Image: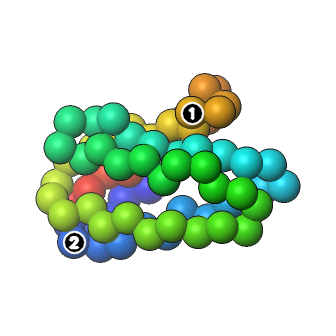
Amino acid sequence: MTVKAGEAVTFTNKDPITHNVYSSTPGMAFDLKTQKAGESTTITFDHAGEAVVHCAIHPQMLMKVDVQ
């Protein structure tokens, strides 16, 4: 996904199972901790770069946030 610097992204767990979304990308790190079904958390990306986002529970899940 692509967003502009300063934009917020809301991560909503629309699955019936728990996830733990996080990024350890230097300068763009965050950890939403455990999110149960239906829970949402908003993260603001303050500066340009690429955040690689994973789920700590399901290592096969991956996404990238391109912040311009």
At label 2, the amino acid type is Gly
- Please tell me whether mark 2 sits on a helix, a strand or a loop: loop
Place of residue 3 in the rendered image (x, y in percent of width and height, measured from the top left): 33, 64
Residue that appears at 63% across and 27% down: 60
Looking at the rendering, in which quadrant would you find the N terminus?
A: bottom left
> Are the residues at dot 2 and dot 1 in contact (C-beta closer than 8 Å)?
no
Task: Residue 64: tell me if it is visible.
Answer: no
Q: Among all residues in the image, which is located at the extreme front?
A: 34
Q: How many marks?
A: 2
Residue that appears at 66% across and 46% down: 19
Q: Is residue 37 above or below residue 18?
A: below
Q: Is residue 24 above or below residue 42?
A: above
Q: Among all residues in the image, which is located at the extreme bottom?
A: 7
At label 1, the amino acid type is Ala
Label for residue 56?
A: 1
- Please tell me whether mark 1 sits on a helix, a strand or a loop: loop
Residues under labels 2 and 1: Cα distance? 26 Å
Q: Among all residues in the image, which is located at the extreme top?
A: 59
Task: Residue 44: tell me if it is visible.
Answer: yes
Place of residue 32 in the rendered image (x, y in percent of width and height, measured from the top left): 48, 53
- Residue 8 shown left or right of residue 41 in the figure: left
Residue that appears at 80% across and 49% down: 17
Residue placed most toward the observer, 62 or 12: 12
Q: Which residue is mark 2?
A: 6
- The 10 Å Cα crowd at callout 2, few under 14, some 14 to 19, many 20 or more, is some
- First in sequence: mark 2 vs mark 1: 2
- Image quadrant in which you'd find residue 67: bottom left
Residue that appears at 58% across and 44% down: 20
Place of residue 47 in the rendered image (x, y in percent of width and height, measured from the top left): 15, 59
Place of residue 22 in the rendered image (x, y in percent of width and height, measured from the top left): 45, 43
- Image quadrant in which you'd find residue 57: top right
